[in-house]
Amino acid sequence: MGWREDDYYFERTEALAREAMKAGDDGFACVLVGPEGDILMEQKNEAGTQKDPTAHDVMALVRRAVHEYSPGQLQECTVYALMEPCVMCMGALFWAKIGRVKYAMSEESMNRMLPGGLEIHSAEFADRCPAPMESLPRIPERPEAVEIVKEWIQSLGIG
Ligand SMILES: [Zn+2]
């Protein structure tokens, strides 16, 4: 397939996030992209269906990916996520040696809509990492991703 534009991968995370919401999970998802630009793995948030608030898409993706790929392979991969990874997910990426993540919407934006999230940003985590790690926001944020998160917050009945 070869590398596509970043938006191609973000569109896939958005489609998956919508599926997650339909299933009763939180509206987030991510994909693992290999060194040649192929989507190797897809993962939706599963917090609702698993009854596990830590079942974030990035965390769940890492848990699957480490069984499928070697640390050397994972080092060459990029995770595309709808939402900026939280520190738990950044930690999982670090331990799995997946050194690069790109995201369509920042946690700062989400916190403006739904306060109570962690105010530790992924870039801060990446800067303090002993290994090279990049957490790269899409600028500007994707309006589609923001809309999905807005819908998800509305679905909670608290936004
Ligand atoms: Zn997370």
Image (spheres, helix red, strand yellow):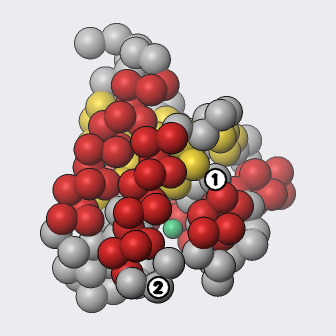
Q: Is residue 143 above or below residue 129?
A: above
Residue 22 at x, y percent in the picture: 18, 65
Q: Is residue 114 above or below residue 108?
A: below
- Measured in 3D between alpha carbons, the distance from the residue under mark 2 to the one under mark 1, in whole angstroms, is 20 Å
Does residue 63 show up?
A: no
Q: Residue shown at 46%/62% (left/top)? A: 150
Residue type at mark 2 is Ile
Q: Secondary structure at mark 2?
A: loop
Q: Residue shown at 46%/34% (left/top)? A: 77
Q: Secondary structure at mark 1?
A: loop
For label 1, the crowd category at 10 Å Cα-Cα, with few meaning under 14, some 14 to 19 and many 20 or more, is many
Residue 29 at x, y percent in the picture: 36, 54
N-terminal of the pair, mark 2 or mark 1, is 1
Viewer-nearest of discs 2 and 1: 2
Question: Mark number for residue 106?
Answer: 1
Q: Is mark 2 within 8 Å of ligand 1?
A: no
Q: Quadrant of the N terminus?
A: top left
Does residue 121 show up?
A: yes
Locate residue 26 relative to residue 125 in the image: left or right.
left
Q: Residue shown at 60%/40% (left/top)? A: 141
Residue 94 at x, y percent in the picture: 60, 56
Q: Which image quadrant is residue 57 in?
A: bottom left
Residue type at mark 1 is Ser
Residue tagged 2: 158
Q: Which image quadrant is residue 8 in?
A: top left
Number of callouts: 2
Residue 9 at x, y percent in the picture: 38, 31
Q: Nearer the viewer, residue 34 or 110?
A: 110
Locate residue 8 relative to residue 22 in the image: left or right.
right
Q: Nearer the viewer, residue 112 or 96?
A: 112
